[in-house]
Structure formats: C-alpha cells, structure tokens
Amino acid sequence: MSKSSDVIILGAGAAGLMCAITAASRGRKVLVLEKSSKIGKKILMSGGGRCNFTNLYVEPDNFLSANPHFCKSALSRYTQWDFIALVNRHGIAYHEKTLGQLFCDNSSKDILNMLTKECSLAGVEIITQVDIETVTRDQSFKLQGKYKDNTCLLTCESLVVATGGLSIPSLGGSDFGYRIAEQFGHTVLPLRAGLVPFTFTDSFKLLSEKLSGVSVPVIITANNQSFTESLLFSHRGLSGPAVLQISNYWQEGETLVINLLPDINATDLLLSKKSSQPKILLRSLLGKLLPKNLILELETLWWPDLAEKPLAEVNDQQLRQLAKQLNAWQLKPAGTEGYRTAEVTLGGIDSNELSSKTMMSNKVDDLYFVGEVIDVTGQLGGFNFQWAWSSGYAAGIAVQ
C-alpha cells in the first residue's frame, strides 16, 4: 500500500478523530491510521460503557502538568460547550451524573458513531490494522510499516501523533508516541499510571478483601491534595472515584489520610453522645453513619476491648483517639494496580517543547502531538476527554 496525504494522524482515539474531523473540514486530505482492528476502543469502554464525554465545569486546575499553563489556550479555543453542541446536533441523549460529569443515556457507541459520521462527512479516510514501524522526515514525512500482511509506504506534509499513553495495554496503550517524540529530539517526562486503584500487602489487604464491594463517601488526602467522593474496598485494596482521583497526586511511599466522616467532627460527636446517650455502644452509634460491615471490621481493628462497653464506661482520651482515627485514618499503599487498569498515563512529552496554540513541535515543523501522549492529565470526570477534544481541535485547525 502506498498513499500520499496532506495530513496523517497516528491513532484513531478521541484526540485523533477530533483532529481529523477538524482538519478535513478545512479541506485537508486526511488519513487516520489505527494499529488495532477497531477504532475508538477506549471511547467504547469509558464511563462503564456510557462515555463520560466531558464535564460542565472544565478549568485549567482540573489538569496536571509540569507546565500548568499549557492547557489553557486549547481548552479556551474548543470548550466543553462546543463539544456539547456537537453532541446535541447529533441528537445524543445524555445526563449529568455528579460534579458536572456528562454521560450518554444509552451507550458510548453514540459518541463513537457521531465521530465516525463526522469523519465520513468531512472526507476522512481511516485505515485499521496498520503497524507503522519507522517515521522519517525529509521534505515530507515518510512512514513505513505493515498493513495487515503487506508493506506500506505513506507520505504526508503534516504528521499528528495521537497514539495515547501506556494505560490499558489491552486496548492498545503503547509507548510508540513517546518513541517518535524522542526520535525527533523531544523530552519525555517520567511516566506513571494515573487514575488507578491502590494495592496493599500489609494487614489492610485482608481487611479490604473482607469489605470488597463496600462503598463509603470520604475525604481522601495525599500530597496536600484532597477529594470528597466515594471510596470502594476491593480484593486488591482501594478503588472508587476518590481513590482514582488521589492516585494522580500520591507518590510512592506516601501515606493516605482518609476521613470516614467528612461532615462530622468525630471528637465532638463521641463526647456529646457520651453525655446524651451514655448506654449506647460504639458500633450502634457509628452504625447509623457508616456501613454495618465496615463498623464491625473497624471494631475488631480499633476498639476490641471496648466493643461491649457503653459510652459512659469509655474514658474521654479513648474516645478522642478513636475519633482521630475516624477523621484521619492513615494507610500506606504498597503501590497501584499499574497501567493494566489505569485510566490515564501521567507525564509524557514535555509541553514546553510544543506550541500551546497549535500543538506543533517547537523542534520539527509540521509535527504535532495531541491527547494523552502530552504531559497533560485530567482529573476523573470527563476532563481527559475534553483535553482530547480541545488538543485535537487545536492541531486540526493548524495542520497544513
């Protein structure tokens, strides 16, 4: 196979497809290459199959980067409202879940079908099962590799790398985009799994196994960052929205602080109930505030000697100590589940080496990077999709 295009986009995910639609709508001849047999695999699996496609409250503060100002230009030029307008034009039903998160009513397929239709209308050509092995640059870019079992040689004026990161390798996550960046002289900042559950190897692992499936609203804190969302106990440790959020900020070896009673000062609660309900047991009191099976496990862990004592027989110092644990439970994860289940890859191509307006390389003309491959990572809640739409659009407006 031999083809020549104005623009070749590597990767048929969210950022790549948005870039293709935008560039082709400007009259560019656009070819999208996808290594796997299907396009948009991460779109389809996202949001539990409902695709959390953006958020009503997108701000630069929702993104992590060594260069926190980099995302501002793209996010302001193609906003959540622009993407919502596109969704509305296609008549896709959606709803707000919590904290501004927008999900499809029916299926993630609605978003992928919308993007596919827009590509078709704009004249984008998409080829799957293309494994590019080498990329070189002379007057134009030359890409060589395999298409199914045949050799392919492709050329283009502008090359857009939208290959994603290392997260969820079963859906195509790879380091190919980083290798292209390094080949052309770019710096790739340290990579690690983000939006990912924690694992434990100490006694807490047994506790989490017993409580697997139990969810509780908490405030979780690490590295001076806090989130108020649900925590989920799992067979391997901790998961749920609060845990995925804090995983982006947690560093290996650090301690997590978990407040099991986000809206309650536990010291005031226990001491006041000692006066007003002196005969009540701790598990009966706390059982009104937390899941019963969690209370029973904490009773064994934190107050076994007080289990059958009414509050009147528990001294104030013991109550204060217990209250401290309820409001600031300290746990040290062994690590995370890694890229296997991570929703995103933290780190990536140093954004100081890219144009924040166009996503073009400052080192090589007509070479662009979009989406997850760049060192810009959104929090949980549709922000990573919005970065894909915004960065893809920024490059699509600029490519030659």
Image (cartoon, rainbow, N blue to C red):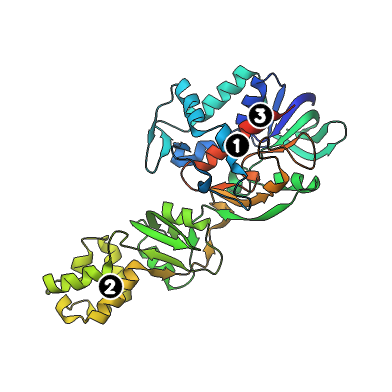
Q: Are marks 1 and 2 in contact (CB under 8 Å)?
A: no
Q: Is residue 67 above or below residue 284?
A: above
Secondary structure category for the residue under label 1? helix
Numbered disc in front, either 3 or 1? 1
Numbered disc in front, either 3 or 2? 3
Specify the amino acid type for callout 1: Ala
Specify the amino acid type for callout 2: Glu
Q: Is residue 199 left or right of residue 361?
A: left
The residue pinned by badge 1 equals 74
Q: Is residue 50 left or right of residue 368?
A: left
The residue pinned by badge 2 equals 299
Which residue is at a point 60% across and 17% down the rendered structure image? 121
Secondary structure category for the residue under label 3? helix
Q: Is residue 377 above or below residue 74?
A: below
The x and y percentages for residue 352 are 70, 48
* Along the line of sight, the residue nearer the viewer: 239 or 377: 377
Tell me how far mark 3 sits from mark 1, CA to CA: 11 Å
Which residue is at a point 76% across and 44% down the rendered structure image? 180
The residue pinned by badge 3 equals 396
The residue carrying pointer 1 sits among few (fewer than 14), some (14 to 19) or many (20 or more) residues within 10 Å by Cα, namely many
Quadrant location of the C terminus? Answer: top right
Figure disc tally: 3
Q: Are marks 3 and 1 in contact (CB under 8 Å)?
A: no
Tell me how far mark 3 sits from mark 2, CA to CA: 58 Å
The x and y percentages for residue 289 are 24, 60
